[in-house]
Image (tube, rainbow, N blue to C red):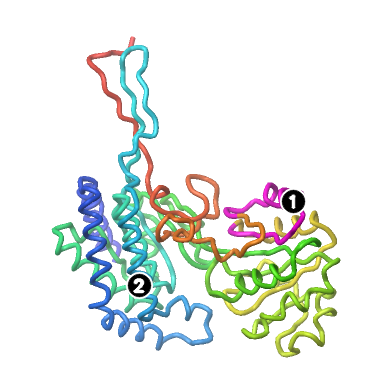
């Protein structure tokens, strides 16, 4: 398997050298054609997706991530069209000057080269990643999970057909075999893959970080908190908590832990009341449990154990932590956060500013839902992931984050003394 994959990676590398010559107009035309081709291939894709869904327990939190339907495919097509309308991130002069010796220096944005994505049961990623990588001039190597094998194959077949139609090397996109052995080859493909981005659970991210020789950008795992301050507006908080927890509980920006100031415990039952409509299970610490007992459905209310804090639930479950002060809330978040998205609900300007300055996360919110952590919502187009690290990229990674730069020096015979 390794020899076969290595040969394929050589072909991808060659394709990456070819696509840097494509014009932005040619790329946009291809992306719009791909988006327009999705409806006519919808049944093929959905049939493949059903084969994947039939192999997964519907109670699995990953089921919703795996699921494709007509509405989701339409949204994916919309995201691809949106990427096509965005300005190219390439050939932008980031810096320009002339040295005293007459040398002209330019710092220009360029593609990274070959980007590898390893991800779990999210077939929409296949479309999103291809669109963003092509728009930014990069070739793509994908390693999807076996859970989405049939879906990914159907999607890649469609993309390859569109690439061929536009006379662009189909090796621009390569889907690795779904076997785990292929991941090991990918993570060690130094010289063939320039950067790897894992998208999925913390377990997957840890595996990639601990085993990769290729540079890695960590994305995905979201252990998300919302702190309801002693000055928080109850009506506002109720809407925000409900949206952050229930909009799409299986995604990384969904709320995992509600942190509440002890002076607002009398409002806790009202704050979480709408969650019961969606059958959200609460794991409450002692103080919160006592306030909720009798006002929140018994079948949905449990005492919190230590493992319920610092957990990315990816389902209709949430923990509740009581704190005595803003300072204690900050300490709790700092201890358990995955540095993804954190929020405060408060009418106290000073508390808000302290929270926004001191919380160390890619995205920090005040008085709004963490569900907005998304490249499209930020106006970046479909994202390739949410980076939770600090080097090169942080937060939603889109076109700009898929480029690097090079220095271009022009002279007229200068030599260095």
Marking on residue 349:
1
The residue at 76%/76% (across/down) is 284
Marks 2/1 in contact by CB < 8 Å: the verdict is no
Question: Does the image show residue 236?
Answer: yes
At which x and y percent is residue 120? 44, 71
Q: Which residues are magenta?
A: 340-363
Q: Residue at x 53, y 86 (%)?
A: 59
Q: In this rendering, would 336 be left or right of 205?
A: right
Q: Determine whether the residue tagged by mark 1 lies in a helix, strand or loop.
A: helix
User: Disc 2 and disc 1: Cα gap in Å?
Assistant: 51 Å
Question: Was residue 353 drawn as part of the magenta stretch in this picture?
Answer: yes
Check the image and report above or below for 176 versus 45.
above
Residue 415 percent across, percent down from the top left: 28, 13
User: Residue 178 bears which disc, if any?
Assistant: 2
Of 96 and 65, the residue lying toward us: 96
Q: Is residue 270 above or below residue 97?
A: below
Residue at the limit of the structure toward the top, as seen here = 417
Query: Relative to the observer, which residue lies in front, 202 or 158?
Result: 158
């Amino acid at each position: 398997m390794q020899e076969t994959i290595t040969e394929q990676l050589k072909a991808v590398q060659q394709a990456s050298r070819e696509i840097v010559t494509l014009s932005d107009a040619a790329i946009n035309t291809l992306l719009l054609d791909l988006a327009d081709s999705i409806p006519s291939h919808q049944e093929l894709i959905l049939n493949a997706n059903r084969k994947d869904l039939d192999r997964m327990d519907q109670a699995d939190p990953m089921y919703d991530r795996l699921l494709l339907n007509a509405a989701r495919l339409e949204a994916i097509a919309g995201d691809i069209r949106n990427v096509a309308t965005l300005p190219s991130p390439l050939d932008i002069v980031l810096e320009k000057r002339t040295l005293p010796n007459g040398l002209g220096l330019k710092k220009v944005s360029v593609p990274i080269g070959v980007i590898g994505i390893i991800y779990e049961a999210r077939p929409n990623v296949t479309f999103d990643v291809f669109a963003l990588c092509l728009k930014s001039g990069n070739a793509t190597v994908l390693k999807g999970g076996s859970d989405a094998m049939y879906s990914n194959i159907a999607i890649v077949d469609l993309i390859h057909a569109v690439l061929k139609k536009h006379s662009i090397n189909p090796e621009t996109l390569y889907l690795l075999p779904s076997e785990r052995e292929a991941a090991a080859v990918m993570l060690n493909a130094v010289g063939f893959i320039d950067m790897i981005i894992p998208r999925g659970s913390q377990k997957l991210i840890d595996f990639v970080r601990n085993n990769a020789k290729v540079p890695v950008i960590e994305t995905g795992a979201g252990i998300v908190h919302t702190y309801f301050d002693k000055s928080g507006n109850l009506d506002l908080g109720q809407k925000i908590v409900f949206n952050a927890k229930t909009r799409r509980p299986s995604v990384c920006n969904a709320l995992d832990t509600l942190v509440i100031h002890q002076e607002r415990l009398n409002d806790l039952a009202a704050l979480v009341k709408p969650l019961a409509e969606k059958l959200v299970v609460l794991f409450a610490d002692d103080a919160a449990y006592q306030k909720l007992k009798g006002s929140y459905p018994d079948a949905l209310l449990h005492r919190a154990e230590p493992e319920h804090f610092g957990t990315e639930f990816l389902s209709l479950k949430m923990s509740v932590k009581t704190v005595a002060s803003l300072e204690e809330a900050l300490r709790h978040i700092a201890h358990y956060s995955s540095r993804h998205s954190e929020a405060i609900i408060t009418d106290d300007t000073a508390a808000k500013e302290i929270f926004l300055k001191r919380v160390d996360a890619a995205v920090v919110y005040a008085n709004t839902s963490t569900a907005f952590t998304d490249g499209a919502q930020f106006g970046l187009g479909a994202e390739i992931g949410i980076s939770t690290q600090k080097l090169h990229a942080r937060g939603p990674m889109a076109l700009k984050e898929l480029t690097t730069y090079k220095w271009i020096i022009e002279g007229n015979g200068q030599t260095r003394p």
